[in-house]
């Protein structure tokens, strides 16, 4: 993997910016699953499956103020909600199509949001933030140690002295992973408004305990046609002490760890690991 590519915030107007945009598009193709090139499908699924995390981010934004940086901003679900609440927000995202969808939503509402095409493992926005958010399992897309170390380093360089990093990742379930996770299970039934068809979405997990990588296969039965669409995405799992150790090793001090969006303390049964950290040095 090569090094840092400058983030692109506007339509590129110089050859260097065009080169950066091309390099980021190539990196996105190499790294990201197909779902992140289909913002319409992402938003359709997100309407049904995205977590109820907005009140938590709104409360954190009210407490710590801005500016706020969201990493892996997607189609702007959180970035736009925070901008709507009056915060200064920057969203960084590697997928051009996801970012374009976020742009369209922000413009439709007349919101002043900065959206940057960039790789959260290597970015330099040249400024610091009161809050840096890594929501909705985005950290799980960093599959190797080098990616994770570089991302935590880049984040630390963007945190204000009194700034906070907020990471939301799920707590892996050893019981689920030990119970034939590769068995195909239906996880969602809905009517696709674009296809005007009933859809059953099923999931398989192909988990490798040695690498802690989980290759997830989503198969869509559309109008009774099995496997009408098949998608894969691989996620790295973070066990609780491991996540805390990574943060400490990267120079963060853990301020709080919640087990869900309502702020309850993290414990063995928590579905989530929501970590609030600051720079220790
Ligand atoms: C689960 S989605 C979350 C989107 C949005 N934050 C939300 O909550 O709806 C993860 C997002 O992270 C982006 N992403 C994954 N790896 C990335 C990277 N290395 N740099 C920037 N964005 C990345 C994906 O393209 C995707 O839009």
Image (cartoon, rainbow, N blue to C red):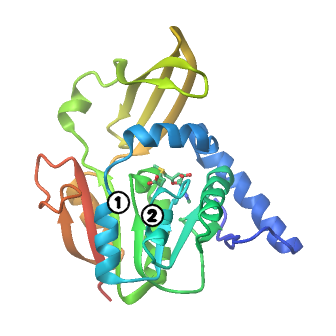
> How many marks can you see?
2
Counting from the top left corner in percent of width and height, residue 118 is at: 63, 65
Of residues 182 and 41, the one nearer the viewer is: 41
User: Which residue lies under the disc numbered 1?
Assistant: 54
Q: Residue at x 62, y 69 (%)?
A: 110
Image disc number at residue 182: none
> Within 8 Å of ligand 1, the CB of disc 2?
no
Res 89 seen here: yes
Q: Is residue 95 left or right of residue 158?
A: right
Q: Most extreme residue toward the right, as rendered?
A: 15
Of residues 117 and 157, the one nearer the viewer is: 117
Q: Quadrant of residue 184?
A: top left
Q: Residue at x 28, y 75 (%)?
A: 277
Q: Is residue 265 left or right of residue 8?
A: left
User: Which residue lies under the disc numbered 2?
Assistant: 81
Counting from the top left corner in percent of width and height, residue 217 is at: 47, 27
Q: In the image, is residue 60 above or below residue 176?
A: below
Q: Quadrant of residue 63?
A: bottom left
Q: Most extreme residue toward the front, as rendered?
A: 109
Q: In the image, is residue 30 above or below residue 152?
A: above
Q: Secondary structure at mark 1?
A: helix
For the residues bearing labels 2 and 1, Cβ distance under 8 angstroms:
yes
Q: Is residue 181 left or right of residue 193?
A: left
Q: Residue at x 20, y 37 (%)?
A: 174
Q: In the image, is residue 124 above or below residue 178?
A: below
């Amino acid at each position: 993997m090569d090094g840092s590519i400058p983030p692109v915030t506007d339509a590129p107007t110089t050859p260097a910016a065009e080169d950066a945009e091309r390099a980021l598009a190539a990196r996105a193709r190499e790294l990201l699953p197909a779902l992140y090139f289909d913002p319409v499908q992402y938003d359709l699924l997100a309407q049904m499956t995205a977590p109820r995390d907005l009140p938590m981010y709104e409360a954190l934004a009210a407490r710590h103020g801005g500016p706020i940086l969201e990493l892996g901003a997607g189609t702007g679900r959180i970035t736009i909600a925070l901008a709507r609440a009056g915060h200064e927000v920057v969203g960084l995202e590697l997928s051009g199509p996801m970012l374009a969808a976020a742009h369209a939503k922000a413009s439709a509402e007349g919101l002043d949001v900065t959206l940057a095409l960039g790789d959260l493992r290597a970015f330099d926005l040249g400024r610091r933030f009161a809050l840096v958010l890594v929501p909705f399992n985005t950290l799980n897309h960093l599959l190797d140690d080098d990616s994770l170390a570089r991302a935590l380093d880049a984040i630390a360089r963007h945190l204000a002295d009194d700034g906070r990093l907020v990471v939301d990742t799920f707590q892996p379930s050893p019981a689920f992973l030990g119970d034939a996770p590769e068995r195909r299970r239906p996880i969602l039934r809905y009517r696709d408004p674009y296809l005007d068809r009933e859809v059953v979405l099923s999931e398989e997990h192909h988990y490798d305990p040695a690498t802690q990588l989980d290759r997830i296969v989503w198969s869509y039965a559309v109008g009774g046609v099995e496997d009408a669409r098949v998608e894969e995405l691989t996620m790295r799992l973070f066990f609780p002490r491991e996540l805390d150790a990574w943060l400490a090793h990267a120079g963060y001090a853990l301020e709080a760890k919640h087990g869900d969006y309502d702020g309850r303390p993290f414990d063995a049964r928590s579905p989530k690991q929501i970590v609030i950290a600051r720079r220790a040095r």
